[in-house]
Amino acid sequence: MSLRDGPLNDMKPPLAWLAVAALAVALIAAIAIFVADRRGAPLFPAASQVREKFDSVMGPVEAVVSAPAHWAREGVGAVSAYVMAGSQNRKLKSELAETRFYGDQLNSLRDENARLRALLGVRTDPPLPMVGARTVVDARGPLSNTRLADVGADQGVLEGNPVLSEHGLVGRVVGVAPSMSRILLLTDVDSRVPVLIARTNARAILTGDGGPTPKLAYLRTHDAPRVGDRVLTSGDGGVIPRGLPVGTVVQSLEGWRVALDCDAAPIDFVRILLFRDFSQLVAPGAMAPKTLPPLTTAPPTPTPAAQAPATQTPAPQTPPAKVPMAKAPKAGVPVIQSAPARAASSDL
Amino acid sequence: MAAGAVQPLNPLRWLALPALACAGGALIFAAPMEALGLRLPEPIFALVPAFAWAIIRPSILAPFALLVLGLFQDLLWGNALGLWPLALLAAYGLTAVARPALSGQSFWTLWAWYLAAVMAAFALACGLTWLMAGEAPDLLGLTLQGAVSALLFPLAWRLIDAFEDADIRFK
């Protein structure tokens, strides 16, 4: 008798049906998790916490896993620097000669700039604090382009902080754990960054699609971009400060795209700008709520009984008082309101 | 199939070990490695067991193992949670439906079917991402990642070869 004809064969239909049921349950669970991980969904905070915990655990693990890659890169860099020392020396000398010329120009322009600023009274943005980090996880597929950096909330990193390499903007922080943070790269399909073209000041939204060169979407200008135009952050929306280098314009079959500056070298070390919003760029004292002036009222309306002495002794001249809108006038005490204040109170 | 290499169907060996190997592979390939301006490809290792488990035999544990593997990938890469579990389960489900026709097929025929399963998983993941982000993912990137994932079929073949004949109730 073969096993196929034996008692074991009786197990086949229930097990097959149970397998189908298990697949259905797993599918329903996957759909539920997918729906719950949307912004605004009731379970979204729980999903965010799971991400934070995972990043906290996986960060050190991946740091160990990626250590050989870092060592190999440093080793290759050291060897190539040794082998290429002669040609590098010649290249650096020519660059130094060129830089001296630009250095003189820079000093002259810096001086002129400072005098013009003083003349116009322009207030420039103060320098922003930043923290350095090393990336340990690199998701680079077409559906996700993120990195995990080894600094987090303990170092003052917040969600939304812009991230730069030594060449330009890399992305922004989208998740923060105590010692790790998740960086959404400019190339990610979810990434949208307001930018401007430096030559024309034209605004656009840099839209990632998983490819190496993000698109320039919603480009608003009468002056068409040119290949090689510099692209900077525009600061619109207040998430990323203005003027960070992003890349240069390139043309593709579907339209204008941007070749990112940060692609010039591997993104293994990054700087995270501890930028919250534009309120950070002014003195905190200036933004603090001021103490409202004390409530001053007009002198009480003289009653007929009190009019006689009042005629003998004239009341001191008190300037008419303006009452702040937030303060309700005391009952029976007339106040003089400015026209806008009256309009506002009538609206109320 | 090499009948001599058949192993008993121990869940630790046909489910847990391949799942751990996939997680380890994803971890290693998530390291920021770059040489001469070229970066490592990022294959979807979990598609290998998703295809092989469906062919070996119907299983209660396999869909949940794929759910966990997909969630691990989403958390590692920063995807929306549930994206890769859905894609992997879709590939598993389609392969399981086609299992009566696939069982005992040759290496190249199964590779063609594996390619179809990979394409189905990528189509679903791409569609969901497009739906969420409002932007179609880069087609060239998708093709490259799909091609690299399809090249992993010999691993799936090894897994199938080792365990397909272990449970004759489903032959």
Image (cartoon, coloured by chain):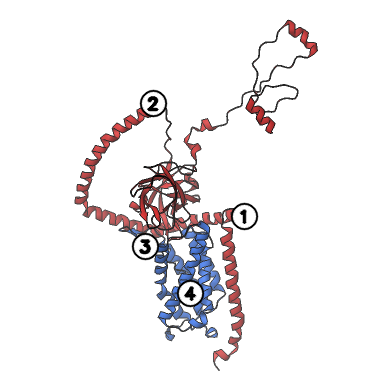
Q: Chain of mark 2?
A: A
Q: Are marks 4 and 3 on the same chain?
A: yes
Q: Chain of mark 3?
A: B
Q: Amino acid at mark 2?
A: Leu
Disc assigned to residue A119: 2
Mark-to-mark CA distance, 1 and 4: 34 Å
Residue that label 3 marks: B40
Q: Position of residue A63 (x, y in %)?
A: 41, 56
Q: Amino acid at mark 1?
A: Pro
Left or right side of A313 for A1:
left
Element type where label 2 sits in the image = helix
Answer yes or no: is residue B41 visible: yes
Residue that label 4 marks: B51
Q: Residue at x 25, y 40 (%)?
A: A99
Disc assigned to residue A42: 1
From the viewer's perspective, is the residue at label 2 or at label 1 nearer?
2
Q: Chain of mark 4?
A: B
Give the letter of the blue chain.
Answer: B
Q: Position of residue B70 (x, y in %)?
A: 51, 65
Quarter occupied by the N terminus of chain A: bottom right
Q: Residue furthest top?
A: A312
Q: Are marks 3 and 1 on the same chain?
A: no
Q: Are marks 4 and 2 on the same chain?
A: no
Mark-to-mark CA distance, 3 and 2: 54 Å
